[in-house]
């Protein structure tokens, strides 16, 4: 009997592991495409394509056009799922866009460029890195050969964003937090956003500047966009995470509009 148990244990330890089933990229995109098909403000664009191991992929892109505010539209890029095993930001952007579509005046003066799945193959495979490569976050502006990085860099340069916001999850934090370059952005954008999100998730006490943001733009880019990375604690309840991200994003739109209005009057 003991020998039989030992044999069973050995077999269990050496049994081939079955990879988890692919997460459905098409299901997520279908939800956003359905919203865009019936919205006067949301436009879907799936022309950015690339190939990996003979399979064709699209970098999903969406544009939300707020009502004109009288000045040049504020162009903000919002990026999620750079790590494929962190889909929280993508699902939060679906909620965010649904709320904006029902309340478009919240985006008055903005053109929002939405990139919900920056790492399509990692999202499918439930891995942080894209298929056949290393993680994307550290590859920006370093002559990377990764097609996803090249496409995203081209978007950032072509649209000359006034701001870039990245959504991510972090296993090393216990509360919601924000990262920005410098005290001014932290005070005017990050702190109000985190305080608003606190109604859904606790605040991580390391709010503020913590090194490089995920998509840090090249030093020579002018105008240089503001850069914010919003992070939720990994494994927080999905609904609360989505609500925290959505509330933080809405707050940044409100606060940045006030910030630039104040700057114009100086």
Image (tube, helix red, strand yellow):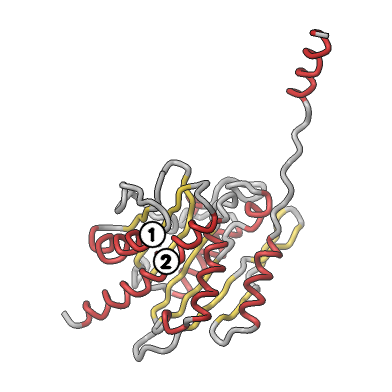
Q: Quadrant of the C terminus?
A: bottom left
Q: Position of residue 227 (x, y in %)?
A: 37, 62
Pointers 1 and 2 in contact (CB under 8 A)?
Answer: yes
Residue at 35 percent across and 48 percent down: it is 204
Q: Quadrant of the N terminus?
A: top right
Q: Position of residue 85 (x, y in %)?
A: 59, 49
Residue labelled with disc 2: 247
Judge whether 111 appears above or below 150 on screen.
below
Residue at 31 percent across and 72 percent down: it is 255
Q: Position of residue 172 (x, y in %)?
A: 43, 41
Task: Give whichever of 238, 136 is nearer the camera.
Answer: 238
Residue at 53 percent across and 66 percent down: it is 93
Q: Position of residue 89 (x, y in %)?
A: 52, 59
- Report whether 33 appears left or right of 73: right
Residue labelled with disc 1: 199
Question: Is tag 1's residue or tag 2's residue first in the polypeptide sequence?
Answer: 1
């Amino acid at each position: 009997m003991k020998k039989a148990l030992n044999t069973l244990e050995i077999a269990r330890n050496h049994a081939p592991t079955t990879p988890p089933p692919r997460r459905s990229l098409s299901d997520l995109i279908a939800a956003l495409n359905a919203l865009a098909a019936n919205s006067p403000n949301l436009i879907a664009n799936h022309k950015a394509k690339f190939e990996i191991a003979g399979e064709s992929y699209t970098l999903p892109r969406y544009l939300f056009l707020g009502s004109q505010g009288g000045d040049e539209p504020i162009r903000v890029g919002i990026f999620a799922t750079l790590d494929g095993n962190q889909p929280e930001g993508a699902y939060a952007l679906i909620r965010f866009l649904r709320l904006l579509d029902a309340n478009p005046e919240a985006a008055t003066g903005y053109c929002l460029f939405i990139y919900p799945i920056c790492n399509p193959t990692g999202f499918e495979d439930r891995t942080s890195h894209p298929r056949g490569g290393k993680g994307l976050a550290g590859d920006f502006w370093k002559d990377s050969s990764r097609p996803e990085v090249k496409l995203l860099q081209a978007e950032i340069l072509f649209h000359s964003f006034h701001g870039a916001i990245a959504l991510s999850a972090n296993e090393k934090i216990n509360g919601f937090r924000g990262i920005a370059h410098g005290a001014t952005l932290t005070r005017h954008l990050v702190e109000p956003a985190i305080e608003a999100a606190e109604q859904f998730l606790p605040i991580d006490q390391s709010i503020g500047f913590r090194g490089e943001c995920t998509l840090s733009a090249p030093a020579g880019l002018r105008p240089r966009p503001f850069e914010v990375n919003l992070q939720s604690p990994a494994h927080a309840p999905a609904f609360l995470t989505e609500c925290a991200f959505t509330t933080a994003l809405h707050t940044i739109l409100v606060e940045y509009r006030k910030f630039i209005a104040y700057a114009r009057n100086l």
